[in-house]
């Protein structure tokens, strides 16, 4: 059993209060107890982040424990080991003696071992005639025994935190995959909404996570992604229910038919959902389902539909929503857009929207310009306008500037799709080919 005498370091090493506390904590005031040295060492390896020690220091401690002859650390035995630095270096896999001394100082500072220096600073032991240790000078392992419960609790806390962080990472990975694919589905299905802004906010949340995040940071990110996932799912479900209720929008809504093959079959479009923007700041502050926009009432005199030869200036008052046109009419007026569809032809609105995104990138139309056009005209009408721009691209200097001009005119109620489409349709009917020049006036608006 060790004496309860407080010693000071040899030579120039100063005495600190931490050393005093560590020595007093190693007192044996409790009943005799013991602990497996390798069990406590494994707990130390788990709890090293909480104790502020490195793996190299643990390698030195492992070498020290190997010099203790028994597997059990007991407070009724002499717990001092006294190997030389040369022997420690051999058992520490050839670690340099200067490095060993530095890590020994770190173990002492962490309160895991206590120095018991001899009068001359050497490490040695005196034995009785029977060969038993009488007095030894070196490093005492008593703090490991006295702090065994504390170390085991710290190790359990570290393991619990690591498992919790691992579970959070798995759930975040699933949310990242689901959100990315749901946004892609919304864009493919041409669902109303500023999905580019939502995707930018989503990427901002992911990119703002540090390389080695804490459990608190992971919980914060998981909460935000969970709210964003819930909002996107709600939007998609709302769109799906609306689509089911109005399976065929020509069935229950008024439209005018004309026997003329070039006439416009005009139908009232379904009320669009609000194009709610979700920026990175909105996502950080709060994430909630956007309120649906209040639809403008349809004029009572819908039977007097917009004639083919009416100019855009007379299309309607400010803020009037654009009319949508049948897909087959758009394809006949703008056949060149089909080449940019994934299948090489336009079968539905989804194909037209996908092709318009490709054409917009090719014509260097910025995402901001495209988003403003979608907010003013609607996704389908914006795709139609881009198809018209492609059809007359040789006569338009800047497609982006031209689309911005049409967006401003739409917001003022000074633009209509009918004249633009009919001009292209007549040109295609007369020439019967895509390559021949077409009229220079597109929708009665000069190309910018």
Image (cartoon, rainbow, N blue to C red):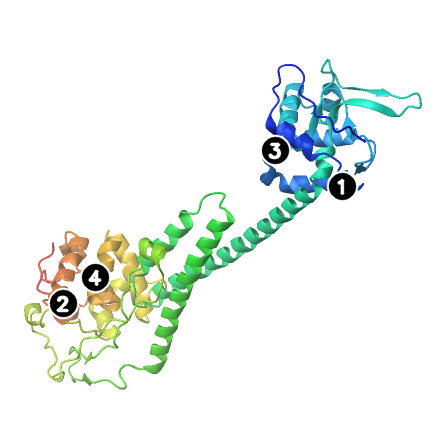
Alpha-carbon span between mark 4 and mark 2: 16 Å
- Residue situated in front as seen by the camera: 7 or 248: 7
Alpha-carbon span between mark 2 and mark 3: 73 Å
Q: Which residue is mark 2?
A: 420
Mark 4 vs mark 2: which is more N-terminal? Answer: 4
Q: Are marks 3 and 1 in contact (CB under 8 Å)?
A: no
Mark 3 vs mark 1: which is more N-terminal? Answer: 1
Per the rendering, the mark at residue 250 is none
Alpha-carbon span between mark 4 and mark 1: 79 Å
Q: Nearer the viewer, mark 4 or mark 1?
A: 1
**Does residue 206 lie above or below 440 as drawn?**
above
- Where, by quadrant of the figure, is residue 15 drawn? top right
Q: Secondary structure at mark 2?
A: helix
Q: Secondary structure at mark 3?
A: loop
Per the rendering, the mark at residue 54 is 3
Mark 4 vs mark 1: which is more N-terminal? Answer: 1
Q: Which residue is mark 1?
A: 30
- Residue 197 in the image, given as x and y percentages of width and height: 31, 57
- Residue 232 in the image, given as x and y percentages of width and height: 38, 65
Q: Nearer the viewer, mark 3 or mark 1?
A: 1
């Amino acid at each position: 059993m060790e004496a309860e005498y407080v010693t000071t370091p040899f030579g120039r090493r100063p005495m600190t209060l931490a050393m005093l506390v560590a020595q007093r904590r190693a007192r044996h005031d409790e009943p005799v107890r013991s602990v497996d040295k390798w069990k406590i060492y494994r707990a130390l390896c788990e709890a090293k982040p909480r104790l502020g020690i490195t793996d190299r220091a643990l390698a030195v401690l492992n070498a020290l424990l190997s010099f203790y002859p028994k597997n059990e650390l007991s407070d009724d035995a002499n717990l001092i080991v006294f190997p030389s630095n040369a022997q420690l270096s051999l058992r520490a896999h050839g670690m340099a003696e200067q490095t060993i001394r530095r890590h020994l100082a770190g173990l002492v500072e962490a309160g895991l071992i206590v120095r018991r220096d001899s009068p001359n600073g050497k490490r040695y032991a005196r034995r009785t005639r029977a060969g038993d240790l009488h007095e030894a000078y070196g490093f005492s392992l008593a703090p490991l025994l006295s702090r065994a419960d504390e170390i085991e609790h710290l190790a359990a806390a570290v393991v619990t935190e690591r498992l919790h962080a691992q579970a959070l990472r798995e759930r975040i990975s699933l949310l990242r995959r689901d959100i990315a694919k749901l946004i892609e589905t919304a864009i493919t299905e041409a669902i109303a909404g500023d999905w580019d802004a939502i995707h930018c906010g989503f990427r901002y949340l992911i990119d703002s996570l540090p390389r080695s995040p804490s459990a608190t940071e992971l919980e914060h990110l998981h909460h935000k992604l969970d709210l964003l996932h819930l909002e996107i799912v709600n939007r998609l479900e709302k769109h799906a229910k609306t689509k089911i209720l109005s399976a065929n929008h020509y069935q229950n809504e008024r439209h005018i038919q004309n026997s003329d093959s070039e006439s416009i079959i005009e139908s009232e479009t379904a009320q669009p959902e609000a194009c709610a923007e979700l920026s990175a700041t909105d996502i950080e502050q709060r994430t909630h389902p956007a309120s649906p926009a209040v639809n403008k009432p349809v004029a009572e005199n819908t039977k007097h539909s917009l004639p083919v030869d009416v100019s855009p200036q007379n299309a309607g008052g400010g803020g009037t929503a654009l009319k949508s046109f049948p897909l087959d009419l758009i394809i006949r007026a703008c056949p060149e857009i089909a080449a940019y569809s994934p299948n090489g032809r336009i079968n539905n609105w989804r194909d037209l929207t996908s092709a318009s995104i490709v054409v917009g990138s090719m014509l260097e139309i910025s995402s901001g310009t495209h988003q403003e056009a979608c907010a003013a005209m609607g996704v389908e009408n914006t795709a139609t306008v881009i198809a018209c721009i492609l059809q007359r691209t040789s006569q338009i200097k800047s497609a982006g500037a031209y689309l911005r001009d049409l967006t401003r005119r739409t917001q003022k109620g000074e633009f209509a799709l009918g004249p633009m489409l009919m001009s292209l349709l007549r040109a295609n009917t007369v020439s019967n080919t895509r390559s021949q020049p077409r009229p220079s006036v597109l929708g009665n608006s000069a190309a910018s």
